[in-house]
Image (cartoon, helix red, strand yellow):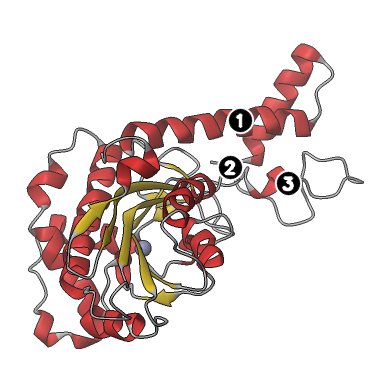
Amino acid sequence: MGNRPPQGENPVLPKHQEKAEWEDAIYDVTALTAASSEITSLIGCLSADDCAQVILQKSSNASKTVVAANFPGALPGDQILAMVAAVVEKRGYTESNTLFAQSVCPDEINHEEGDITNILTKYLGEVFHLGGLAGVPFTGKTGFGAFSHHVPDDGHCFVLMAPHIGLDNESNLGKYTRDGQLGCSAAACGAAGGALNHCCSGLPLPDMAACPEDYQMSFLMHEIAKRMDVILASKDENTKQAQLARQTHEISKSMLDKIVNVNFGGSNSTLVILSGIQINMPRPLDDYFQPLHFYVISKDGQHTSLFEEAFGHASA
Ligand SMILES: [Zn+2]
């Protein structure tokens, strides 16, 4: 990829023109300049903005194709909210009687405008954070206990759990092109990718008891190590990274199942669980979310699936 020029020295735009919206999404201005010149010579009337829109549309279509192939059912966060809201509102869940918690990797790209995390937080009012590295609910039974005992009388708890995976500008899963990092992309989720790299390296697994200062990463390494056969059976790098995200979701869900309960609120209180995979899309696209579980647990412990009612199909 070409280098992003210093701010204020964009070679494509006329000098008088303000910074265009696409400048935050197209890093390879060298390629854009070449494309612009080529198209203009052919047609003679297209501006850099016109060319940028063509390139962005092609890039967006490529990103959506990768997501559809690897995460069927994934949709932008606002569409997921509409489907979730239609189901929970008719059952009486409201901002005033429902507390929201999320178990999501702390990475800043998971907490941006348009992400399912932020959308649900705005919808339900506040958020309690249960997650640590890779979105695993490392706050544990103590964290869930603290959260759930903040619920109003006869109120409800709603938990979103969403490990994440990046998709960079070159359609590589497991990577993300971050602002200000010229011409390169880095691992996302970095913790899950780092755990996988460690397991591939042949180095011994760390002794969890001996490294309390990095306990979460040690736990991830041990759990990923158990799943290497499944992950490495993937046919190419993108499917391997998608499998890593699915395995990270399973690791997280397994812990979530062990820490939640319905010992809160009153006799009508319930717990709603929505879990899946958050896909960090290249700018300017909003992140996508692939739902994998959506159900409610009533006071007697019974699980009632809301998945098909909400999303119109069975879980992938
Ligand atoms: Zn992460």
Label 2 sits on residue = 2
Residue that protrudes farthest toward the right in the picture: 16
Image coordinates for residue 94, horizontal then vertical, percent = 49, 66
Look at the numbered disc 1 and give the secondary structure of its residue: helix
Residue located at (78% from left, 13% from top):
43
**Earlier sequence position, callout 2 versus callout 1:** 2
Q: Which mark is residue 143?
A: none
Pair 2/1: label in front: 1
For the question of whether residue 34 can be seen, the reply is no
Lateral position of residue 180 relative to residue 276, left or right:
right
Q: Is mark 2 within 8 Å of ligand 1?
A: no
Determine the residue positioned at 24% across, 74% down.
262
Does label 3 or label 2 sit earlier along the sequence?
2
- Do we see residue 126 in this rendering? yes
Do the CB atoms of the residues marked 3 and 2 lie less than 8 Å apart? no
Residue at mark 3: 21
Q: Earlier in the sequence, mark 3 or mark 1?
A: 3
Task: Specify whether 230 is left or right of 287.
Answer: left
Return the x and y of residue 263 as percentages of the image width and height: 23, 80
Q: CA distance from mark 2 to mark 1?
A: 20 Å
Q: Which residue is mark 1?
A: 57
**In which quadrant of this rendering is ligand 1 seen?**
bottom left
The residue shown at (51%, 75%) is 126
Residue 242: give x, y in percent of width and height.
28, 44
Q: Position of residue 131 (x, y in %)?
A: 33, 72
